[in-house]
Image (cartoon, helix red, strand yellow):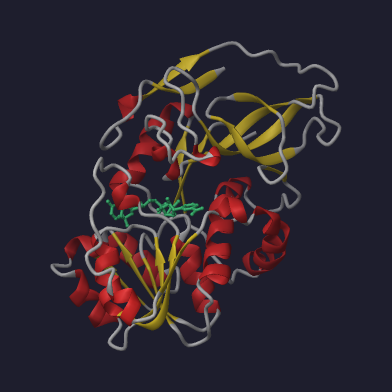
Amino acid sequence: NKQVVLRDYVTGVPNESDLVITSTTVDLRVPARSMTVLVKNLYLSCDPYMRNRMRKPNPWSSATAQSFIPGKCISGFGVSKVIDSGNPDYREGDLLWGAVGWEEYSVITPIPNLHFKILHTDVPLSYYTGILGMPGMTAYAGFYEVCSPKKGETVFVSAASGAVGQLVGQFAKMMGCYVVGSAGSKEKVDLLKNKLGFDDAFNYKEEKDLTVALKRCFPQGIDIYFENVGGKMLDAVILNMRPHGRIAACGMISQYNLENPEGVYNLSLITYKRIRIEGFTVFDYFEKYSEFLEFVVPYMREGKITYVEDVADGLESAPAALVGLFHGKNVGKQLVAVSRD
Ligand code: NDP
């Protein structure tokens, strides 16, 4: 059973060598009535929050983002097939997605709202790491619940071509908003404008002044900012927000590798502009997962929503795929195909 193991706690930008591939044995049976399930992992999801789990535990490590243990297999979200079950709710051959080890086979005890049986199998199974999994649910909850969007509003999304951002942009377009995204390469900007239906997009790495870039895209200002990156972008956005604007603080990836996070200098403007900034985590919304599926699956089937994936092949490619997120190497949702059957 090949596994991805954390070598030691990480400071600064993570390297591929912080994660090593090792091998152990696995029993291909689980005890009857143990409530456990043996699964074969098909796809693993590379997610930015996993960087926070590579840190030494600190008082802010939450139950959902507990630090990985050096020398042990790391874990994350994945799509898996049941091989053997001691749990009456799961049978051999069932498919599920949820928290598993980064390994070929895992023994899990399924937990409601952390493991979900896969019922729609007429779509690519890998989608359960993205549009139909945790990032999809994040985009849905973050946009519809936190942003309070209205038709005709202006929406800015950072890290817009990624797992979450590409969906937020499409949801906002479906609602009749004007949507602009930022991303870190020309290829990603083209994707946003030509495939994902954004009204406009810019490469933040090529803009001398982000405040000017945002003013150019939003001469009348921004009503909604879907925040994925933080730092300088957040500062520039606050200057360009309209009164009563909303900021959904989904994540701040530009800060995850810093030992001393950057300051946000324009924060005092939120008072005068009556801006609402609200952080959220997807874990608070998983009880709405079936509502989300009912919403998103028909749009997907009708081709009204598209989803771009970046698939790395084989467990050996997992370390590079995961750390690649922090260099913007992924184009779309980054995942690892461990096994396709
Ligand atoms: P992505 O698929 O967007 O991948 C990460 C992207 O972030 C990279 O491709 C890169 O794109 C960009 N990036 C990396 N480093 C920086 C940097 N220093 N400055 C600016 N951009 C950077 O990831 P996700 O869509 O999965 O996640 C997006 C955000 O949502 C993250 O902040 C994540 O933590 C958060 N999140 C929050 C959840 C919640 O429950 N609140 C749940 C899931 C995700 P580029 O080339 O454009 O720079």
Residue depicted at 27% across the width and 87% down the height: 219
Residue at the limit of the structure toward the left, as seen here = 208
Q: Give the image quarter of residue 210.
A: bottom left
Q: Give the image quarter of residue 117.
A: top right
When the figure is inspected, residue 196 is found, relative to residue 12, above or below; the finding is below
Q: Position of residue 154 (x, y in %)?
A: 41, 82
Q: Position of residue 287 (x, y in %)?
A: 70, 55
Residue depicted at 28% across the width and 80% down the height: 217
- For the N terminus, give its image quadrant: top right
When the figure is inspected, residue 62 is found, relative to residue 241, above or below; the finding is above
Q: Position of residue 91 (x, y in %)?
A: 82, 32
Q: Nearer the viewer, residue 114 or 321?
A: 114
When the figure is inspected, residue 201 is found, relative to residue 17, above or below; the finding is below
So how many labels did they put on this image? 0
- For the C terminus, give its image quadrant: top right
Q: Position of residue 272 (x, y in %)?
A: 32, 81
